[in-house]
Amino acid sequence: MKTDVQIAQEAIMEPIGKIAQHLEIPEDELELYGKYKAKISLNYWNTTLQQKENGKLILVTAINPTPAGEGKTTTSIGLGDALHKLGKKTAIALREPSLGPCFGMKGGAAGGGYAQVVPMEDINLHFTGDFHAITSAHNLLAAVIDNHIQQGNALDLDVRRITWKRVVDLNDRALRNIICGLGGKAHGVPRETGFDITVASEMMAILCLTSDLEDMKKRLGNIIIGYTRSGRPVRAEELNVTGALTLLFKDAIKPNLVQTLEGTPALIHGGPFANIAHGCNSVMATKYALKMADYTVTEAGFGADLGAEKFLDIKCRFTGFKPDAVVIVATIRALKMHGGLAKTELATENIEALKKGMTNLAKHIENIQKFGLPIVVAINAFPTDTENELQELKALCESMGASVSISEAWAKGGEGAIDLAKKVIEATKKPSNFQYMYDENDSIKDKINAIATKIYGADGVNYTPAVEKTIAELENEGLDKMPICMAKTQYSLSDDQFKLGAPTGFKITVRELRISAGAGFIVALTGNILTMPGLPKKPAAENMDIDINGKITGLF
């Protein structure tokens, strides 16, 4: 069996200008990064696209992930290819895979098998430099803060309450908590600080949620970097570097155009991690795609409790987007893991474990129905699936009013998702009654409680004393009227990764609250979630290599 990277390397790619023709993008509006990658100009939006009608928007999400795999991105790509095969003018809008953190756990491919975006190695490595721009801008602001303190501290910043950290696109537990400024007077003022991963940074969220350069400049200026000794929040604009920060995003803000193995246009921009961050691809990419295509297939990170909830409650709220249909991806293997089976036991038929695990899928169907949107369940097929298991799963979906389709996109590409595409087209014609889970003007606790009880199935929420204090401060400062971005384990509906299926009788514990005023939301950290994970005992990087000819192996 060929690996993902082998399949990608054997692909015959079209020059990116030819791919652009599918969406009628003029050659002059492309900014080329070699033969197979391009950014689409801001001028094209300003002069042409913004006047056009939006096409249909399809959101792909999934059950809570397991080590058995779900195939959400594979399904998104396969669905896009199938729509393209059916003669529909289609664009796929995806998150960028992350270089550093992914080298901890996985190789980082977007999609897999015969449903991938290419050039695979480029997309997974440096791509067009977007993450580098995010990292540089983030760390520039950190450096300016420390320089301000060194140069007399005219703003009277409290060095004990600087909330802005540094970032790096790498899992590195040794950087979580550090002291900077050591070495004497010439080297700055010593203070406690730390690093987060780039993909979990506020700069990433700003790139993803900004609508143009003017909006970006405003959001960057709104960042709260810390507090004065009197307790006043200080914004980035007070440090007079908003212009410099914005210019670092001059190119990064433009959506990236690539292609699938089958030549379907794909816009890959921003993302990726919905367990600790916003976790959706950029507003820029989505809005471009909606204007250029009749059908846009997009996704959000991890399960519907995280990515889809943030897409609908945050991204749609800021932009006015409204999905015409939602696809929930599941595998029988993963559902059996939710039902209590070990990974080694999944190849054998087990209806009982499947029934138990299907509660996870049922909860996600119920949640998307609460948002008022039509649903198609995509069962990502494996050779070990039995007819009895498939029938059991189909019956559940149909009993809940969700249409269901067997997807074989991994093995067959677009051809394996034709039935799914047809059912999705039908779903987009159904009436919908889109609504949010909460009003952004509700209290912080009411908003968190709405997500925890309605989406996770929790009985309520516990808050640490530190969070209670933060809530009071934010309310006092008038910073509480924003959506909530929950940081929670992706593996469970609860904040305990070991509670699989659809747990009941639990409460969510919020242990830290962070204001991301530039992004426009409040981050609630729950359970043991980390914004700077460590590398595992055997990092995925150990499996990678490159030969004398530059051929890469080990990305998956």
Image (tube, rainbow, N blue to C red):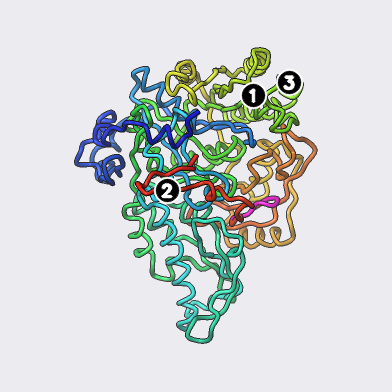
In the image: residue 345, left or right of residue 308: right
Residue highlighted by disc 1: 332
Residue highlighted by disc 2: 546
Are there few (<14), some (14-19), or many (20+) residues within 10 Å of tag 3? some
In the image: residue 66, left or right of residue 271: right
Where on the picture, by quarter, is residue 239?
bottom left
Three-letter amino acid code at the position of disc 1: Ile
Magenta span covers which residues? 526-531
Mark closest to the chain's N terminus, 1 or 2: 1
**Front residue of 50 and 64:** 64
**Front residue of 386 and 25:** 386
**Front residue of 129 and 13:** 13
Disc 1 versus disc 2: distance between alpha carbons? 36 Å
Three-letter amino acid code at the position of disc 3: Asn
Disc 1 versus disc 3: distance between alpha carbons? 10 Å
Are there few (<14), some (14-19), or many (20+) residues within 10 Å of tag 2? few
Q: Mark 1 against mark 2, which lies toward the viewer? A: 2
Main structural element of the magenta stretch: helix, strand or loop?
loop
Q: Is residue 182 magenta?
A: no
Mark closest to the chain's N terminus, 1 or 3: 1
Where on the picture, by quarter, is residue 400?
top right
Residue 427 horizontal/vertical position (percent): 49, 19
Residue highlighted by disc 3: 350
